Amino acid sequence: MPHETPTLAELQARFQAAIVGGSDDILGFIPPNSRTSNAVLFGVYRFAYVSRLVEVVRNAYPMLARHMRDDAFVRMAERYVARYPSRHANARWYATDVPELLSEGDYADAPVLREIALIERQLDQAFDAVDAPVLDLAALAQHPPETWSDLVFAAHPSVALLTLDTNAFDIWVALKNELPPPDVTVHDAQESFLVWRWDGVPNVRRVSDEERMLWSEAVRGKPFGGLMEMAATYGAPSEAALRVAQYLNGWLSAGLLSEAMLRPREAAKAFDAVPTDRTI
């Protein structure tokens, strides 16, 4: 029976299946030359595909690559390529699931790897976050002082709160500055970090336990007056209002907030009646 000639679309589909899925159906349509076989010729494309995606992963996680060193990072990236076939037309989104890979198998014994990857992924996501207004002190001042206790705040879309169990942040900072990184340590208690975009540039900074608690409550709708009450139970009550005001000023100065609005007192009371898990 004569060999049926596939259409261009069918050839393209088989070519992709051969590269991504390992199928050899395409080999019958690739003629060998005088020097090598069709399998070797097509192997060039397979190798190039994997190598390109490994570089995509490296470009997305440059500090992780420095920390792991080249051979270990390439093995991890090749495992990622095998586990996560490319589903995106834009290569920028391809390496999103690297932290998930690093939470599995033998990588789970080195949680610092996942946490370095989390920092780098969140910085990329902050850069790509949608645009939104940035609340400043002048806009906040439009609200009469007597209404401030009922103000609630909306975070800028680029902001995320990370909690880390290791000193991954200190390692990431050292690697970024091309300095010798500290030895890996696991903290007795988690540390928290805010990641956001300001003036087009991704940023990350460490936050105290009190600021983490107040930020978490603020972005889930706790009114300003309620934040001061919570701060009074967290530290010196006489300084609670000043501490919350200082945190708020820092959030405004850094561009972490997008909006302030009045919340009806009835809604605030209903919010306070809902129990909340303080662990982030």
Image: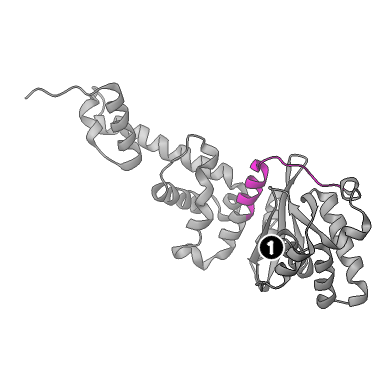
Q: Which residue is pictured at 89% across the width and 62% down the height?
A: 245
Between 150 and 117, the one nearer to me in the picture: 150
Between 123 and 173, the one nearer to me in the picture: 123
In which quadrant is the C terminus drawn? bottom right
Q: Which residue is pictured at 57% across the width and 50% down the height?
A: 65
Up the image or down, 272 lies above or below 29; here it is: below
Mark yes or no: residue 267 visible: yes
Which x, y percent locates residue 184?
A: 63, 66
- Highlighted magenta segment, given as a residue range: 119-136
Which x, y percent locates residue 73?
A: 51, 51
- Taking the view exactly as shown, the residue that stands out farthest to the left is 1
Between 94 and 169, the one nearer to me in the picture: 94
Element under disc 1? loop
In which quadrant is the N terminus drawn? top left
Which x, y percent locates residue 47?
A: 38, 37
Up the image or down, 198 lies above or below 2; here it is: below
Asked if residue 133 lies in the magenta stretch, the reply is yes
Q: Which residue is pictured at 65% across the width and 43% down the height?
A: 129
Which x, y percent locates residue 186?
A: 63, 71
- Taking the view exactly as shown, the residue that stands out farthest to the front is 266
Asked if residue 57 lies in the magenta stretch, the reply is no
Mark yes or no: residue 246 visible: no
Q: Which residue is pictured at 39% across the width and 48% down the height?
A: 82
Between 37 and 53, the one nearer to me in the picture: 53
Instruction: Find residue 185 and report its image quarter.
Output: bottom right
Which residue is label 1 attached to? 182
